[in-house]
Amino acid sequence: MRYGPRLMQAPEAASGRYGPYGGRYVAETLMPALDELTHAYRETQSDSEFQAELESLLRHYVGRETPTYFASRLTAELGSRVWLKREDLCHTGAHKVNNTIGQVLLAKRMGKTRIIAETGAGQHGVATATACALMGLPCEVFMGAEDVRRQAPNVQRMELLGAQVHSVTSGSATLKDAMNEALRDWVTNVRTTHYCVGSVAGPHPYPMIVRDFQAVIGREARAQMLAQAGKLPDAVVACVGGGSNAMGIFAGFLDDESVRLIGVEAAGEGIETGKHAAPLCAGGVGVLHGAKSYVLQTSDGQIIEAHSISAGLDYPGVGPEHAWLKDVGRATYASVTDSAALDAFQLLCRTEGIIPALETSHAFAYLPTLAQELGPEADILVCLSGRGDKDLETVLEKLEERG
Amino acid sequence: MGRIADAFDDARSKGRAALVIYLCAGDPDLGTTEDLVVEAAKSGADVIELGVPFSEPTADGPAIQRAAERSLAGGTTLAKVLQTVAAMRKRTDVPILLFGYYNPILAYGERKLVEDAAEAGADGFLVVDLPPEESAELREWAIEKGLDFVPLVAPTSNPERIARAAEAATSFIYYVSMTGVTGSKAVDLGRASERAGALQREVGRPVAVGFGVKTKQDVASVAPHVDGVVVGSAVVSIIENAASHDEAIASVRSLVSELAQGLARQ
């Protein structure tokens, strides 16, 4: 099967479908807003003024392009050549800002006067609050009470940036519940409000829009690998919660058949314990938050709470394009436990002087397995999606538990 | 013609709107739900919307969210809801519209659900997160089995979407009175009902207005304009506040009887 550009891009443009996945499973009230958003987004794609403004902000404000860096000490440690796409060096410390700058710019153009967002780790919330401060729009962020607790520094950041943070106590009080509450707000204030979705999840056109805004990661990385390594990578690895950093970096390589694409999900306490956040590896097909994809659910179709040490991966669903990439075999998906992620976190700190986010640490935790398989001649590109300052408290607590 | 359309016709012929009452199946337990449906029908409910609980009720406000949580905590499944429908069918002829979200339906199997629902004696489906774009199959299979498919129209729906809903409707159209979740405070129910009334005249199908309808006065402000009035969160709340099975039955009886007094069209 050939994964040419037409095959990769055609599905969602017409129908919002990636094979059987995606679509729009939302209340009727929201359907016109999704049409409006799709239409407005299409207009911006051929609007050179919009594109120039976006590019200028990404360059001068976000700090793009971000480097691709050859991690020599990590390479020595693991046995394959490892390259890091440094999204942790983006303004606000993670890739999330690539998307929020784009969406808030789009919302402003659409005449929306208020922005809402959901957040798990708080990185998307901070990135949305940042874009709103930059463009002068009021911002409200929904965050699970459990995440408010474990990601306190990001709550403080959002508030300093002028955003109002709503602590969501319903359900498991994590990312999925924050998204439920954001949807309830949106259905109430849909005429004036843009819902800035943070991942490649949700109803069409969100998976497409977020993927496109994040695709800058993959475009840059591909050119950088060719320039610096003189070749394409043999494998591209990224962590997958909803899947936005993975989709962003994968987008640059979808048509390069020689490049393996590997997404790493959170196995939490272990897939076999049932306490994980790995719908692609261990879930089934269902509909959650407006799209059909893989989800964690009971046999009766009730959503199961996800479990991960990382707030940003603690989500029982995943973007529909990942579901499709899995089914057609273009990408493969693995999972690593909390404990393995913690080890990888420390490894990167000590070998490269980089403190990664716990989310990102999951991608690194898969490298020993992959390096063993690919050997010393292979080049592995990892999406270093975010920095880990926000996770220090969690990490130190867990390390202390280990003794 | 099915039981739901009959109920709307019957109400119209009596010079009043039809009263549609929402109950969350399994709140507090399925046995009580069966009794509540029978009681609501006796007290003046023309149609029952029987809520099938889902863990992520994104279109619902706090009252129905809590009801769904209680129901799921008690072990309610779609299969058990259908068993309950079969049991209540032996006690009442009131039309029963299964009301819920798509994922439990997908997990059950759409085709199998339609067959089992027909067998149990349910009368139709309303799926909150299944807009016309995604509902063609379920609707077609439902019609094959003689079941209704009830589409929603919202204040944000444009003429094109309204036309599509009208085409999809087999009995009535559910008009959402406001942009919001269930149980929100109605901004201006009278005006919303006028718009719904215009919709009903335009498409030539019965329209029922729901969201934010809580009291007899609310019912009275809707009833002159359309063929149906839906009350949900208010009913769910009194069940939540009832201290016992008997108290729940008694308060539903009294609320539904009172709401029914607002249905007349003068």
Image (cartoon, rainbow, N blue to C red):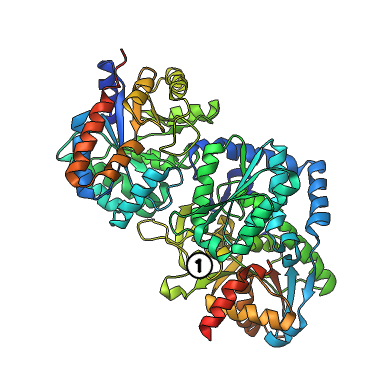
User: On what subunit does the disc labeled 1 rest?
Assistant: A
Instruction: State which quarter of the image contains the C terminus of chain B.
Output: top left
Q: Position of residue A133 (x, y in %)?
A: 72, 48
Seen at 70% across and 83% down, the residue is A350
Q: Residue furthest top?
A: B266
In which image quadrant can residue A398 be found? bottom right
Asked whether the viewer can see residue A199, the reply is yes
Considering the numbered disc 1 on the image, is that residue within a helix, a strand or a loop?
loop
Q: Position of residue B156 (x, y in %)?
A: 54, 31
In this view, the residue in front, B125 or B262, is: B262
Few, some or many residues within 10 Å of mark 1 (<14, 14–19, 20+): many
Q: Position of residue A18 (x, y in %)?
A: 57, 53
Residue hosting label 1: A278
In which image quadrant can residue A390 be found? bottom right
- Relative to B34, say whether B264 is above or below: above
Q: Position of residue B257 (x, y in %)?
A: 23, 28
Q: Amino acid at mark 1?
A: Ala
Instruction: State which quarter of the image contains the N terminus of chain B.
Output: top left
- Relative to B259, say whether A235 is above or below: below
Q: Residue furthest left?
A: B91
In this view, the residue in front, A109 or B83, is: A109
- Relative to A232, say whether A353 is above or below: below
Left/right placement of residue B204 relative to residue A97 reads left
Left/right placement of residue B137 relative to residue B245 reads right
- Relative to A152, say whether B43 is above or below: above
